[in-house]
């Protein structure tokens, strides 16, 4: 990270977006541990994971209730998360260990997305102690939040004032936040003439405010220039995206449209317009849109063919009960039917056809997911961890578990499936490209395109069926946690354009993201020049 020498100004704390980290509730019960004599009580590890899931999901009262000091814990977690503008923490537990005194330690990795700046990554650990009632609680200490947090030192977020530069679209037309409100979160990331926003997290003395050290820095110095930032955005597509976001009905949502042939971003929109650029930095379970990648992995090795019968029951239990949306079932369905109707149980039943790391390997090798992308603005480039157990492997087959993506990633996945070749998404031309991928075989591409087309003509993406052109698509419904409505997804490809949209708590993809993409594709019926 860059250590900043220019003057910084402390930010004012803002309300944290209480969006649940994808798969939080599921993560609370993940992973069997060694049951040997010296192994820690599995209940302790479960408590730790539940604490992390609640913290990540913004359920700070729930996280605090799992500690030995709920009142203090809730206040500290709230001040830490909101005060540092952290949005959607990603907290990953490692294996629990037992100490000689009977206590348990659960290390974890924290990835804290700081709004508009980047991700602060560090490691810490949760101490747990057995309670008189036989249960376990997190033994509350400031240092568990971060090893350097203490009674004498706290953190402060500082942002450097950077002027928003002039930004133009692919034809040289001016793009401003006034004319394109949902671009505001994007335009701010070009601050400093392309260097991006800058800031740092400082460790400061609680009494004097004196800086004791810099935990991490964000952004880089850019050369001062009056030249506008030339982007790949298309004013016509961006204008249509702006109008389409009204279909979100006030829910948090985002979309990305990009060219299939070269990955250039044509439109990027967020609702609400200000704040977090969830379109490229969001971390969501992609749900059933991920079945494009899962299908690719299965088709690549000949593990299944579109006309093979793969039964679709209402429920399937793999450590936990999985079901289809509205508990639908299709006895004797073909794999093609399973894809077009988005049958979770059918896909999960095929998990034995893939090795433990195979889904992630395919995502990385053919789709570039998880490699480092240089888009032109800060981005989150996806994660497909190796499943810890059969339950998580089952979940990963349908884009759940610990798989993370966002609209930029899923628009790229859609483009790759349609063309067979991955192109790193870019919003500013001429940037670095360190990705290395392999083209999908022609027969696999043909099968994927046919499956996605059938999803529009006879499946769950029928909301797009009345539009002209051979549109192919895939819907997704991604579980978040108990008590929270599902996120709705829809990805689509028409001609040389791939699009992806997510609506938080949208319930279903067709019902929430469907009207947004229908509006977008209706407004710009042709390919970009």
Image (cartoon, rainbow, N blue to C red):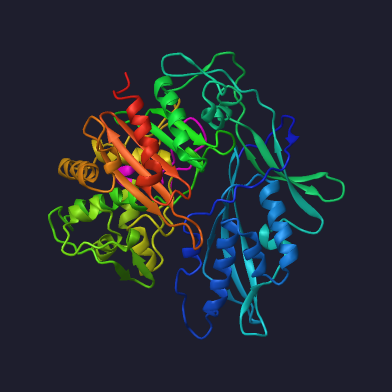
Q: Nearer the viewer, residue 454 or 87?
A: 454
Is 342 in front, or is 416? 342
Q: Is residue 374 visible?
A: no
Give residue 238's position: percent from left, percent from top.
44, 25
Extreme-left residue of the structure: 307
| In the image: residue 16, left or right of residue 327 | right
Return the x and y of residue 489 as percentages of the image width and height.
39, 46
Residue 370: say if magenta. Answer: yes
**Residue 466 sits above or below residue 143 on the image:** above
Instruction: Locate the C terminus by quadrant.
Output: top left
User: How many circles with numbers are drawn on the protein?
Assistant: 0
- In the rendered image, the quadrant that contains the N terminus is top right
Q: Residue at horizontal 87%, vertical 46%?
A: 208
Vertical order, 338 against 426 (above or below): below
Position in image of residue 372 (x %, y %): 44, 41
> From where the camera sits, is residue 499 visible?
yes
Task: Identify the residue shown where x is 58% and y is 65%.
Answer: 107
Asked if the magenta segment contains residue 201, the reply would be no
Q: Up-down: is 311 above or below 260? A: below
Q: Is 487 positioned to the left or the right of 444 in the image?
A: right
Magenta residues, as a range? 365-382
Q: Is residue 521 left or right of residue 214?
A: left
Q: Residue 386, located in which quarter of the rendered image?
A: bottom left
Q: Nearer the viewer, residue 145 or 509?
A: 509
Foreground of the two, 506 or 203: 506
């Amino acid at each position: 990270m860059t250590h900043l020498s220019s003057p910084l100004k402390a930010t004012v704390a803002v309300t944290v977006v209480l969006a649940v980290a994808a798969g939080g509730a599921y993560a609370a019960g993940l992973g069997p541990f060694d049951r040997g004599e010296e192994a820690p009580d599995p209940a302790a590890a479960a408590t730790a994971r539940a604490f992390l899931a609640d913290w990540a999901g913004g359920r700070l009262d729930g996280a605090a209730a799992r500690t030995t000091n709920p009142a203090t814990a809730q206040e500290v977690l709230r001040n830490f998360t909101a005060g540092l503008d952290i949005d959607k923490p990603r907290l990953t537990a490692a294996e629990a260990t037992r100490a000689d005194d009977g206590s348990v330690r659960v290390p974890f990795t924290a990835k804290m997305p700081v709004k508009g700046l980047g991700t602060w990554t560090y490691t810490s650990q949760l101490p747990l102690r057995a309670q008189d009632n036989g249960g376990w609680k997190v033994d509350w200490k400031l240092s568990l939040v971060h090893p350097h947090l203490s009674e004498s030192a706290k953190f402060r977020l500082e942002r450097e004032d950077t002027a928003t530069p002039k930004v133009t679209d692919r034809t040289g037309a001016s793009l401003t936040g006034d004319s394109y409100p949902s671009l505001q979160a994007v335009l701010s990331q070009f601050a400093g003439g392309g260097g991006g926003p800058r800031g740092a997290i400082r460790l400061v003395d609680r009494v004097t405010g004196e800086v004791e050290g810099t935990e991490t820095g964000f952004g880089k110095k850019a050369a001062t220039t009056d030249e506008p930032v030339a982007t790949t955005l298309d004013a016509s597509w961006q204008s249509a995206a702006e109008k389409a976001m009204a279909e979100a009905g006030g829910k948090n949502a985002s979309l990305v449209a990009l060219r299939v042939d070269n990955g250039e971003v044509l439109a990027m929109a967020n609702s609400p317009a200000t704040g977090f650029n969830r379109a490229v930095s969001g971390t969501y379970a992609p749900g059933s849109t991920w079945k494009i990648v899962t299908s690719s992995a299965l088709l690549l090795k000949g593990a299944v063919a579109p006309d093979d019968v793969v039964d679709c029951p209402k429920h399937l239990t793999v450590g936990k009960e999985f079901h289809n949306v509205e508990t639908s079932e299709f006895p004797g369905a073909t794999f093609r039917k399973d894809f077009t109707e988005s049958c979770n149980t059918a896909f999960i039943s095929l998990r034995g056809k893939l090795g433990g790391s195979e889904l992630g390997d395919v995502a990385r090798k053919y789709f570039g997911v998880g490699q480092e992308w240089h888009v032109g603005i800060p981005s989150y480039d996806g994660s497909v961890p190796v499943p810890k157990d059969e339950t998580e492997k089952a979940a990963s087959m349908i884009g759940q578990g610990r798989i993370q993506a966002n609209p930029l990633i899923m628009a790229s996945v859609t483009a790759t499936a349609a063309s067979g070749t991955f192109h790193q998404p870019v919003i500013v031309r001429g940037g670095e490209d360190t990705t290395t991928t392999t083209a999908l075989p022609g027969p696999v591409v043909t099968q994927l395109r046919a499956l996605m087309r059938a999803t529009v003509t006879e499946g769950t993406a029928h909301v797009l069926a009345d539009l002209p052109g051979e549109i192919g698509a895939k819907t997704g419904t991604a579980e978040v946690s108990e008590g929270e409505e599902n996120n709705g997804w829809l990805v689509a490809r028409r001609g040389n354009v791939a699009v992806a949209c997510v609506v938080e708590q949208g319930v279903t993809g067709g019902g929430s993201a469907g009207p947004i993409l229908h509006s977008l594709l209706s407004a710009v019926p042709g390919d970009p020049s």
